[in-house]
Amino acid sequence: MSEATSALPGPVPVGILDLAVATGHHVLDLDDLAAHNGVDPAKYHVGLGQDAFSVPAPDEDIVTMGAAAALPLIERHGVEGIRTVLFATESGVDQSKSAAVVAHGLLGLPSTVRAVELKQACYGGTAALVAALGIVARDPRERVLVIASDVARYDLDSAAEPTQGAGAVAFLVGAHPELVEIEPASGLFSADVDDFWRPNDRSTALVDGRLSVTAYVDALLGSWDDLAARGGPAPHEIDRWLHHQPFTKMALKAHRAWGKHAGAETSDDDLATGFTYNRRTGNSYTASVFLALAALLDLDDDLDGRRLALFSYGSGSVGELLTGIVKPGYRTLRRTDAGSVAATLDARTPIAVGDYRALHASHSGPGSASSLDRENPRVTTGPFRFAGVTGGARRYERTA
Ligand code: HMG
């Protein structure tokens, strides 16, 4: 055995050390969308369980939101130990260069950091978490910065339109975590299904909504069975559930189905706290389940030593069910952010339906995905902006 290998510490607990949230500049109130679409607002608020969605400004995208989410983590913890940045997204801005490299530059990370982007629909953030756990288990001196950032965009006037959204969650994964220790067993379920996908020539997703709902439930039940077969906890040993939330009612439907399947009693109230932020941001794809985690850690004062189940679903499809134990003292750590997610959501600038529709339409023309040279208007008040395109390359800048 080489000297370097023999110097590695033995197995240690690994998990999430800290996490932070960012979202888009604008917010569209679903009451306004309901009025425009001639729909009873209760269909959105109760039927889908959504109140509003974030809309990125023309000088925002997954990179600016992701870097904005990661910035407080770097400010709080420094770059010590970070040797990997994983950027999970399904609304990537380049087919070759990873958003991780751009975020790496914006955040001023050292050159001794590997940077890569991961994709499998909404599951990408959890794939990044699992990869990060492996990297840290291999060398517990290392930390991994995970960024999950997405813009959910469907066709205007489609059934999926009210479930759009945008958001980013960044978290640091390391040894001896202060927030949540992730347990080793996980449940997996993959199946090739055309329930939701976005071909390379489209700025909006194609979706078979009904199929997607059943595919999601199948993945949860399959992941549960796999976790059980691998020695996972019994239903009564799970204190809180967090599900991927394309719209919060989806999580309720899936949770009820799990209850029947596992012979467990469930109540819709079990999930309400984890819905708090997602109801206001809309679907943030890879970030969604971690936004639910942020809400739970911020708003539930009785989590010391509690076991969480965290279910991630990515269309196409991959599901994974992880469990983790909340570390005592999480409240003190989250106090740094106390009120900050709510303040971020409150601070968004309302957008009128007409302006939102114009912004949406611009993405299928020379919009945010285009490589045409341009200067973007200065709109965002976030710490980073997508300034424009020069020679086909996207230019980003720090605003403050
Ligand atoms: P829809 O047209 O809104 O469906 O489309 P609906 O007419 O059945 O209405 C929805 C619910 O509103 C129903 O409740 C109605 O009863 C209720 P449910 O029967 O489902 O409990 N409703 C009302 N409630 C109160 N007051 C009223 C009222 N009217 C009706 N007045 C659909 C829904 C999900 C199909 C659509 O939103 C969609 O296509 N969404 C996008 C796909 C999606 O989010 N799928 C979820 C699973 S797939 C996933 O999670 C992955 C994803 O995040 C992508 C990725 O992985 O990358 C999407």
Image (cartoon, grey):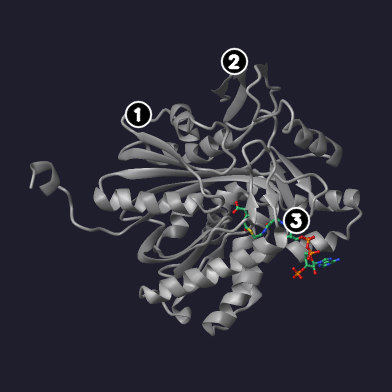
Give the side of residue 187 with respect to residue 291, left or right. Answer: left
Q: Is residue 78 above or below residue 338?
A: above
The secondary element bearing badge 3 is classed as loop
Which numbered disc, 1 or 2, marks the residue closer to the eye? Answer: 2
Label 3 beta carbon less than 8 Å to ligand 1: no
- Residue behind mark 1: 110
Q: Where ligand 1 lies, by image quadrant? A: bottom right
Q: Is residue 272 visible?
A: no
Which comes before the other along the chain, label 3 or label 1?
3
Label 1 and label 2: CA atoms lie apart by 25 Å
Pointer 1: residues within 10 angstroms few (<14), some, or many (20+)? few
Label 3 and label 2: CA atoms lie apart by 38 Å
Q: Residue 366, how many percent across, how many down?
A: 72, 25
Q: Residue 46, how many percent across, how many down?
A: 77, 65
Amino acid at pointer 3: Asp
Task: Using the rendered view, name the quadrant where residue 390 is placed.
Answer: top right
Q: Is residue 94 above or below residue 238?
A: above
Amino acid at pointer 2: Thr
Which comes before the other along the chain, label 1 or label 2?
1
Tell me, for residue 51, which label it has, or none.
3
